[in-house]
Every structure is written in structure tokens, then in C-alpha cells.
Amino acid sequence: MIETPYLLFLGDAPDQLAAKVAQGIKDWRPENAVGQFRMEGCKADLGLTDMDLVEAREAGAKTLVIGVANRGGVISQDWKKVLVMALEEGFDLASGLHNLLRDEPDLVAVAEACGRKLHDVRIPSVKYPIANGVKRKGKRCLAVGTDCSVGKMYTALAMDAEMRERGMKSTFRATGQTGILITGDGVPLDAVIADFMAGSIEWLTPDNDEDHWDLIEGQGSLFHVSYSGVTLALVHGGQPDALVLCHEPTRAHMRGLPGYQLPSLEAVRDTALALAKVGNPDCQVIGVSVNTQHMGEEEARAYLAKVEADMGLPATDPFRFGAGKLVDALAAV
Amino acid sequence: MIETPYLLFLGDAPDQLAAKVAQGIKDWRPENAVGQFRMEGCKADLGLTDMDLVEAREAGAKTLVIGVANRGGVISQDWKKVLVMALEEGFDLASGLHNLLRDEPDLVAVAEACGRKLHDVRIPSVKYPIANGVKRKGKRCLAVGTDCSVGKMYTALAMDAEMRERGMKSTFRATGQTGILITGDGVPLDAVIADFMAGSIEWLTPDNDEDHWDLIEGQGSLFHVSYSGVTLALVHGGQPDALVLCHEPTRAHMRGLPGYQLPSLEAVRDTALALAKVGNPDCQVIGVSVNTQHMGEEEARAYLAKVEADMGLPATDPFRFGAGKLVDALAAV
């Protein structure tokens, strides 16, 4: 568990897109972001107050989160100067970079000397159990996709936000590095040992109030041959009561797999639901979330209307048109 | 890759069953087993020549394989005396125990001093790639089960043996610790990091002759909520041309999951085939392997006849009645 709130480190981001982790934190957990730290030449700006380390500490920040992608996959010497000072100033550090903080001996030494923590959210920090399949109390909703990176995290976060606004009981459950940094905890599922995948999701979504919903971040796709096993562990470990189908209609092929076409929404619905019923016979598909970012507004609305007619399910782009329809459907379960 | 042939270490096995890894090696790769090493009080006997370390070295053994389960989960001091002597005598050590050889500082020190290797086959020793889904040459057959431990490894080994006898090109591909010790290599799939599961199976079953068959050892079940993700990684990473359904008809519930009924063979056929076709549209289900060990002979034959009639597929118990029918079906693919 990462201590909040955060100071968001944007480093020397070459553009706004490089800071998308920080952007996610600011968008979804603004209360976690007291300010931003930008180095000389930084081309990203979240519109948060620029702070130095002392100001951020005074504003209550506990952890400096690396909210930016690093260039060339390494933690540069320029970054390190800031990171070392942050540790000395009393911050923990959190990062989702492939270049682990713990693999940098100088950071480890300073962290130890200062009694601070280094959080590498790509690496599990918990010894997860083997899944036992026992029915848990409370309700769970899982986003399943036609492909990777079609908006599953965004869908779960948007539904969670809408549910909180309505006063419903809900918790977003992160299963990837960005989600973990946004909320401060979760399971980095792609880095979990095979035998413990489903168990890690049971651990992440324990017994809860009968009227509480876990919104579980999906990963991969049952139809993506590189990662489908990770997805099935979510379907079975998550024991979902509700599935939301996620889709991006303009993709020419499965992400990273030029020879593979995307499955139809119907195929994902039927396959995911049949498998989910093994773990929860009452599971149902409640709606469709479409990422329409590459479509004009009229085209997007027409596409959503067609999906609703074809599938007999509510369909929306939660970013563009709100998550209300999906939450209405969930409330009716 | 573990150097063969082996001296099979039976230790102080309390009974024959405790030596089942050694039994598997002797049954399936007798050419790998030059002899057995038994300590005082050993109650297991494979019918191999009893040898001391010097005799085994002279007979050509390269690796001492721990072919017996340890009591209490620890490597005892009595065992260690033998293991240390074996290293000094020039043997590598191989083990599938939970208590890793590499976690024993004295064994590590002696192995280093003697220039010998410690193989813990529960732990991957390869950095596997992410699966790329590219179609590979050669043919692959995967055993998929209604449950865990229904005879998937045995089925693949029996088919492989029958195919070699017929002069067909085949290779058994181990995905679990016992299979790895039997053949000397493979992927310990349950210990692979989630993101690399399917890639590890692509790595295990590379391009081959067009008329060569990989017989891939199955793991878990698509219907076993604890391990289904591992199974799906095999279905997609293995890119199978042929599936063999494996079943044990007398089970009251899924292994380790008292609340879960076994799926029907029809359900496994339909689910596994639909998912396998994502990676290989030409995949087909070619037969059924039934573990009839808890049935009388007449009952077993009647059950197999009923499966054949119901499913329209050849069905056999390869241990009891031979793998011929399954290999006939494979040859017809």
C-alpha cells in the first residue's frame, strides 16, 4: 500500500503523453495529487501547482510518484538527483517503470539510510494464495475486452466514479501498474506467478457488504493469444456477478498480433459469460463500453445505437458520454 | 537441460508411492535410468540395479535425480550426506522438491567448489519471450482435461511412446516438474510469470518438420477456477492442431474445490476447441483419454464404448488398453 497523497514527478517529459500515468492520477484521484514536480525542459503540464520538494512536504505529500515514462528505459542521473533528494526530504518513492527502483543501489542505500520505502508497482509485494473458488460476499463487476488496451481500466474507473457520485458502495480494484499508482494499491497481475494468478484476484476482492461492488480492472483478452491466460484468471478469480464488454472498433488487428483479427462483441460475450459461469452461475453481461476516440461524434453515436440494437445491451463511451447507462444496468442486477 | 542418464535416488522412501517420480522416469525413459540408490530403510524398489555412487559413475550416470518425495518438506541431514558425496563424485543434482536445492547453502557451496550444477525443476531457468502467435511449422497435440490430475501427462507420454514405436516423429513436451525430470527438460509452467506463460509454450514447441508432432503435457483445466489461466496459456501458446480430452469419471468434485462439479466432456470439447481455434483455426478434437483406474475392466470397457457413441470420437484408457486408437486418430489429421 502506497502512502497518499502524492507529489507527481513529471521529470523532463518530452510531451504530454509521456506523463499519462500522472494524468491518470490527476483525473481519477485528484485528492491524491497535491502538486507536480517538473524539471527543466519538461513539456508536460497537468495544471497542478508546481512545487519543490519542501513545498510538497508542507502541503502534506507523502510519496513522490514517477508519473512519466523514462527515455531509453533507464533512470537517468538527472532524475536520480531529484529522487535522492526526495528520499532525504522524507518521501517514499513509487514507480511503475521497467527499470526498478530497487535495482539502483544508490537509491536503495539512501532509502535505507532515511527509513523510506521504494515501491516498484510492477512487482508483487504479497505472497498470494492459490485460489479456493469459495463464493464471496458482495458483488463484483469485471471489464472484459475484445483486445488489450481498449479502455478496460478507464471503464472501471468511470463506473466507480459514477457510483460514488450516486452514493453507491464501490471500489475500483487495480490489476495493472497504472491503476495501482492511481489508487495506491492493487495486484500487478501480469507479474504474478502462474499458479497464484486467480488467487491474487480473490485476495484483491475479498468478502464485502452485500450491496458493495468491486469494479475490477480487466487485463488482456480471452482472444489475445499472448495474454489470454491472465484474462481467464481474472474471470475465475474475480467471480464476477457482472461483465462489461469493452471494444475499440477501429483496430485493424489484435494489438501486437498482425495476423489476428479482433473477435466480435458477440463472441466475447458468449465466451466470457460461459467461462464466468463456472465460477459464478449467476453472472450476466450488463453492457458494452466502446472506446470511440477515433470516431466523429455522429459516427460514435450511430455505432453505439447499432451495438445496442444488435446486442440488446446498453452501450456507451464512458469517457465521451458518461458511464451512467452502465451503472444503471449494474444497479438493476 | 539436465544431463542424462540418471542415478535415481530413492532415499529412505517410506513406501513405493513416495518414489513415483523415479517410477515415472523408469517407466517412460528407462534408457535414462542406469540404476537406483537406496538408503537404509528404503521401502521402495524400482527393480533397477542398486548402485553406490562410484558404480553409478562407472555405469555412465551424469545426474543424481531425487526421485522421491521428502518427509516434512525438508531435505534431511541423512539425505544431505549422500547429496554432498554425489556432488564430490562428479554428479549434478536434479530435484522437483518444494525445498529447493539452491536454498541449502552447504549444497550450493559444494556444488560450486566441484563445478557441478543444481537443477531445481520447479523454477524456470530461462527468460521466456512474450508469445507472438506466429504460426509454427510442424504439428502439435495438447491434452486438455475436465479436471487437474486426470492423466494428461500420462496420455501424452503414452501417445509419444506409441508414435515412436510406429516410427512416427514425435516429442513429448513437459510442462510440469515430473515430466521435466522424466525427459530432462521442459517448462515448469505453474512457476512462470503470468505475462510469459504463452510465450514459454511457444518456446517449448518451436518450428519443426511438417510431419513431426509435439505431444504437449496439459496442466489444470479450463474449468478449474484455480488454474484455468495456466490451461488457456497452453491452448493459445501451444497452437495445437489436435486436442485430446482427458477425464476421470469417478471424481465427486473438482480437485481441491468441493463446491465445483466436473464439466461434461462435451463442455470441455466445445470450450477448448473454440478457444484453440483462435490460435489455430484448423484445430480439431481427435479423441478421449479416460483414466479408468477406479473401474473394473467390464465397467471401463462399457464406459469407453458409451463415450465413443456419445461423442463420436475414439476413446481409450492408454494405460490399460494402449494409446493406439489415439495415435490412429492423430495420424489421420
Image (cartoon, coloured by chain):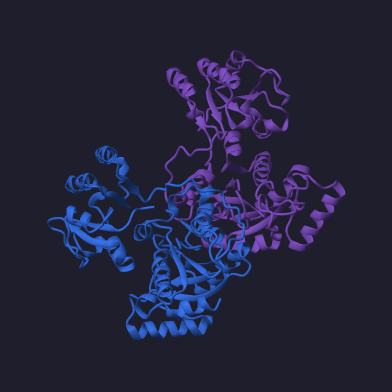
Chain colours: A purple, B blue
> In x, y percent, where is residue B83?
22, 47
Query: Front-most of B107 and A41?
Result: B107
Left or right, B102 with respect to A134, comes to left
Which residue is situated farthest in the right direction here?
A298
Indicate the position of residue A96 as horizontal and vertical percent values.
Answer: 57, 34
User: Farthest left residue?
Assistant: B40
Q: Where's the C terminus of chain A, which quadrant?
A: bottom right
Q: Is residue B133 above or below residue A203?
A: below
On screen, B230 above or below B270?
above
Q: In the rendered image, is residue A42 in sight?
A: yes
Q: Decide if residue A101 is on the left or right side of residue A59.
A: left
Give the answer, above or below, for where A132 lies relative to A187: below
Q: Nearer the viewer, residue B7 or B187?
A: B7
Query: How far across and down, in percent of the image, does residue A257 sit?
Result: 66, 53
Q: In the rendered image, which quarter is residue B273 located in?
A: bottom right
Residue farthest along the top direction in this orientation: A54
At x 57% / y 26%, what residue is drawn? A75
Residue B142 visible here = no
Above or below residue B155? Residue A299 is: above
Q: Residue at x 30, y 66 (%)?
A: B30
Residue A225: quarter of image: bottom right
- The residue that appears at 47% across and 51% down in the rendered structure is A194
| Total residue callouts | 0
